[in-house]
Amino acid sequence: MTAITPTVASSRTANIDFITVSLATLLLAVQLVSLATFNHQPDKVRLLVDGLSLVGYGVLVVLALGYARPATMLHLVGLILFCGAGFIGLALYPETTSPSHFIEHVTSPMLLGLLTMRRAPAPGRITLWLLWFTCAGAGVLASAFAFLGPHQVLGGVTRLAVFAGGQGGIHPSAYASACFFLALFVLWRAKVGFSLVTMTVLALLAVVIFKYQVRTVWVMLMVFAGFSLFYWLAKRSMNLLIAAIGLGLLGAVAIVFLLVSTGFDLGHFSSGRTLIYVERLRVISSRDLLEFLFGSGSGTDKMRGVSAWRWAEKDSHNDFLIVTIELGLVGLLGFLAMIIAPIAALAPPRKGWIVMMAASSAVSNGVLLRPSIGAPLILIAWLSVALREQALQQAEQEQAWLNLDPVPPPSPYPDLVPGRPSRAAIASNLASGAS
């Protein structure tokens, strides 16, 4: 057996780092530009971008296995269960199962494996600046499309013009605006870009997100902010953390009391989601064992049901229910494993990225089954993790440099200075030389 020398191993790691950084950064930049110009792209361009991006995501997941850790193995097991349930569904229901629908749903959960890497290499400074220009430009362009285009009315509410997701892309446009916002926020925290420009674009995107009136996006961002605040307070003061939790619980109780006392209609507020959730649970509980375990096939979630929907046919508006219906209990276990793996792998302050995505999927057809939004968000999360690890590594190197050659404390015996012979030793040597 040929031993691998440290030089060869180091060179191989450097090559993997370079490929990972280059590919992830390029994919993120391409996806952000694609989101901003989605409704103005020819169909062939969209298909080409999506196809090449899917190949790139697969390569990133394979590279993640090069930094294997227990969490990576858990993600791999989840991916196998998820895909296995999909293949079984295709074999059982070939006429109703949609392979393209399955590929769309597996893309973002598969890419979550990137966040289970043992270490996340960070882009260089020039690459980060190029990424900043891309993020800022995409954010400004998308905002211009939103404000200057024809506004739309949905659910009796006037919304800004859409720039992603086709003619009815209110939700995709709102999610895309959140992607631009979070990408710029991560770069601003890393002190990349012109601060005044960054803050101006962030404020503009915040207005766009608010004007779209998509509550699931608001929930997603509030979960992320709340999670980040939790760890910020925990790091600085336990008393502040306890006080914040107490105020949050009191506020939640007050809101529930107010809603109950005013006859709040949860079904109407949720646009019929809670009613359709109950219906879907009844469908799942009435299935036979085979369909309960492996679902009814990808693309079969859309059903005619509760009249509270604005359309006659609608999906579950809950990614976990969608997976359970289409891929059964086995697919759901795989889906959960792919979500839990990065949560276990990430440092506590960065777990909020996955919690945020899972929250969006728990209240709507969120980002985890929507690759056009989920994949960029995962790449932004990877960038945040990589920049944090780079900052920690630089801090450790600076600390090591400062302690490299510490100044020795004053010696109580001046004649015995380290590295210098004492006077008695010099006198002895002279005496022996004279003799």
Image (cartoon, rainbow, N blue to C red):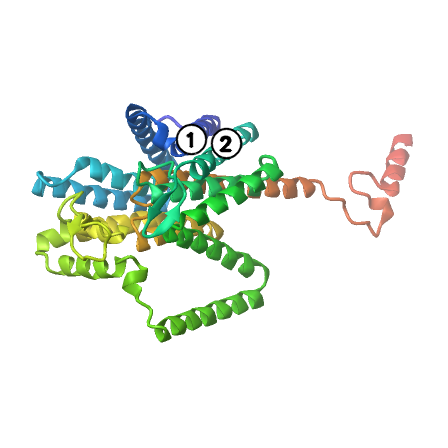
Q: Which mark is residue 207?
A: none
Q: Are marks 1 and 2 in contact (CB under 8 Å)?
A: yes
Circle 1 SS class? helix
Circle 2 SS class? helix
332 above or below 19? below
Separation of marks 1 and 2 at Cα, in angstroms: 8 Å
Could you tell me the amino acid type at mark 2? Answer: Gly
105 above or below 244? above
Res. 117 in view: no
Q: Earlier in the sequence, mark 1 or mark 2?
A: 1
Q: Nearer the viewer, residue 39 or 54?
A: 39
Residue holding disc 2: 137
Q: Nearer the viewer, residue 329 or 208?
A: 208
User: Which residue occupies 18% across, 50% down?
Assistant: 312
Residue 334 in percent (x, y) is at: 25, 48
Residue 386 in percent (x, y) is at: 49, 39
> Relative to 133, is 408 on the left or the right?
right
Residue 172 in percent (x, y) is at: 35, 42
Quadrant containing the N terminus is: top left
Res. 169 in view: yes
> Relative to 399, is 419 on the left or the right?
right
The local crowd at label 1, few if under 14, some if 14 to 19, many if 20 or more residues have their Cα within 10 Å, is some
Q: Which mark is residue 33?
A: 1
User: Which residue occupies 22% across, 45% down?
Assistant: 82
Quadrant containing the C terminus is: top right
> Relative to 288, is 103 on the left or the right?
right
Could you tell me the amino acid type at mark 1? Answer: Val
Q: Nearer the viewer, residue 215 or 404?
A: 215
